[in-house]
Image: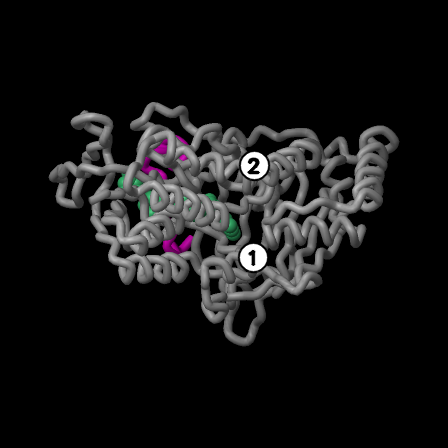
């Protein structure tokens, strides 16, 4: 009987394991820290809830509108509910508990341990070495391995793949005293001062407020300044709020070229599948897991590598273009502050909003009518010309990068020891007093 081993019990691993187990395949899931949850803002689209059957009542918050704030603090308000869909915020622990329960019901065997490396086995079949919590080692024979072990994937390293290009997210969580209300809208802040090359946010989560900054790891040591700038922008919205904890974690900034390697299929963050420029990872983690599991189920009787590789083709066919479009958008608009200003100007346009929101919420490719496409392109070019050529000086001060000395803290530690990141940071961040 076919034996599938899934490494990693995050959303991707749990979805993949549940799918193979439901198809009657013997499935083992290895997770090194089942009781710990890694940091995540938990922003999801209603499409995610529908497709992965997550009950709405698990949401801490519904998000109907996003305020997009430019480097010079001009705002555009993007309505998320116009297409009868919306976004929501879920606590990460609730999502993994739900998916884990379903995987258990489907018959997945859970193993508490850390995947260490592959050992040579007879023929082509992977033999996994797992370190158990007590330190002893156990070996596990698999026919197919699904690597869902996150951004620092050991599975990927064990098959000698290069490390992913990384970004870092730094978040602080604030609580409001009884009677006081956390601001209820989500804000995305653009500008080099708040995030050198991505964005920063304030996101309500029930009675708490999450402040976050995402940036490439090379700017990671300046996230303190960036967060300080974000707090300055929020001003009185933080009045009365008490810091509850802080967390930092890495995310992949570009997808791997190849997702299927012999009998090893990489999914989720391990494959780098976070949509560029929007930090949208949960949906693609779960979708890639579904597609990988479907390929395994289809070919369970003859699981030859070339057949399993259909997973990669399916992924590229479904989401390749969307990821390329996100990467283009990131390149066009997140380079300099004048381009970010242009982005906010564009967001005032109702059609631009509709297309962007539709793409974010539905994750579907769609062809735009020619006239609309032309109008959007013209608007984009005119905005870029306006900020690049006609008015390039105005934002110059924003574009001067400041080199700040780095304070010694757990974020430094996290950046220096990426392999331990998943262990070190969440522990330090489960609502630690600042
Ligand atoms: C701070 C932050 C905020 C984010 N916010 C959002 C958001 O709002 N919305 C969104 O869609 N995406 C968000 N993302 C991205 C999203 O969290 C990830 O894309 C998603 O969690 C990926 O899921 P995964 O299952 O692939 O990996 P992970 O969730 O990282 O799970 C990997 C699992 O593998 C386990 N593991 C690792 N190594 C081993 C090993 N050797 N042996 C056994 N187990 C192992 C880990 O313990 C972990 O449980 C955010 C990312 C960050 C960093």
Q: Please give the name of the residue rendered at 58% of the width and 46% of the height, measured from the top-left corner.
A: 228
Q: Please give the name of the residue rendered at 27% of the width and 53% of the height, measured from the top-left corner.
A: 24
User: Can residue 393 be seen in the rendering of this structure?
Assistant: no
- Residue 408 image position (x, y, % from top left): 41, 36
> Which span is picked out in magenta?
413-434
Structural crowding at the residue carrying mark 2, measured as other residues with C-alpha within 10 Å and reported as few (<14), some (14–19) or many (≥20): some
Q: Which residue is mark 1?
A: 45
Where's the N terminus, which quadrant?
top left
Q: Is mark 1 within 8 Å of ligand 1?
A: no
Q: Which residue is mark 2?
A: 320
Mark 1 or mark 2: whose residue is earlier in sequence: 1
Q: From the viewer's perspective, is residue 146 above or below residue 85?
A: above
Name the secondary structure under disc 2. Answer: helix
User: Can residue 378 be seen in the rendering of this structure?
Assistant: yes
- Residue 202 image position (x, y, % from top left): 59, 54
Q: From the viewer's perspective, is residue 266 above or below residue 40?
A: above
- Identify which residue, 112 or 140, lies in the foreground: 140
The answer to whether residue 41 is magenta is no
């Amino acid at each position: 009987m076919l034996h599938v081993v899934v490494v990693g019990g995050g959303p991707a691993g749990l979805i993949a394991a549940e799918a193979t187990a439901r198809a009657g395949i013997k499935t083992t899931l290895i997770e090194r820290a089942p009781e710990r949850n890694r940091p995540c803002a938990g922003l999801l689209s209603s499409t995610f809830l529908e497709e992965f059957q997550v009950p709405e009542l698990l949401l801490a918050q519904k998000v109907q509108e996003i305020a997009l704030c430019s480097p010079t603090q001009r705002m555009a308000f993007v309505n998320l509910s116009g297409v009868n869909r919306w976004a929501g915020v879920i606590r990460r622990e609730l999502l993994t508990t739900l998916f884990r329960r379903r995987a258990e019901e489907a018959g997945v065997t859970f193993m508490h341990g850390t995947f260490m490396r592959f050992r040579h086995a007879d023929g082509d079949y992977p033999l996994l070495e797992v370190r158990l919590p007590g330190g002893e080692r156990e070996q596990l024979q698999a026919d197919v391995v699904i690597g869902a072990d996150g951004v620092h994937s050991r599975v990927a390293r064990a098959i000698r793949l290069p490390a992913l290009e990384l970004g870092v997210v730094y978040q602080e969580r604030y609580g409001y005293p009884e009677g006081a209300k956390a601001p209820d809208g989500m804000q995305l802040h653009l500008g080099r001062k708040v995030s050198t090359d991505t964005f920063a946010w304030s996101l309500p989560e029930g009675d708490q407020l999450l402040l976050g900054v995402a940036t490439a790891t090379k700017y990671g040591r300046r996230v303190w300044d960036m967060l300080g700038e974000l707090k300055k922008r929020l001003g009185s919205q933080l009045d009365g709020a008490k810091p509850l904890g802080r967390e930092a974690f890495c995310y992949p900034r570009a997808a791997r070229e190849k997702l299927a390697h012999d009998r090893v299929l990489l999914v989720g963050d391990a494959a780098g599948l976070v949509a560029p420029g929007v930090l949208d990872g949960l949906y693609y983690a779960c979708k890639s897991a579904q597609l990988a599991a479907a390929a395994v189920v289809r070919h369970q009787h003859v699981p030859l590598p070339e057949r399993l590789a259909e997973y990669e083709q399916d992924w590229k066919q479904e989401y390749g273009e969307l990821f390329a479009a996100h990467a283009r958008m990131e390149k066009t608009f997140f380079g300099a502050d004048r381009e970010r200003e242009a982005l906010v100007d564009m967001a005032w346009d109702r059609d631009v909003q509709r297309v962007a929101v539709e793409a974010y919420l539905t994750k579907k490719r769609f062809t735009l009518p020619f006239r609309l496409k032309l109008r959007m392109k013209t608007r984009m070019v005119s905005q870029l010309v306006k900020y690049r050529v006609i008015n390039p000086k105005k934002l110059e001060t924003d574009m001067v990068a400041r080199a700040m000395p780095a304070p010694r803290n757990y974020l430094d530690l996290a950046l220096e020891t990426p392999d331990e990141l998943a262990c070190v940071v969440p522990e330090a961040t489960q609502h630690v007093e600042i």
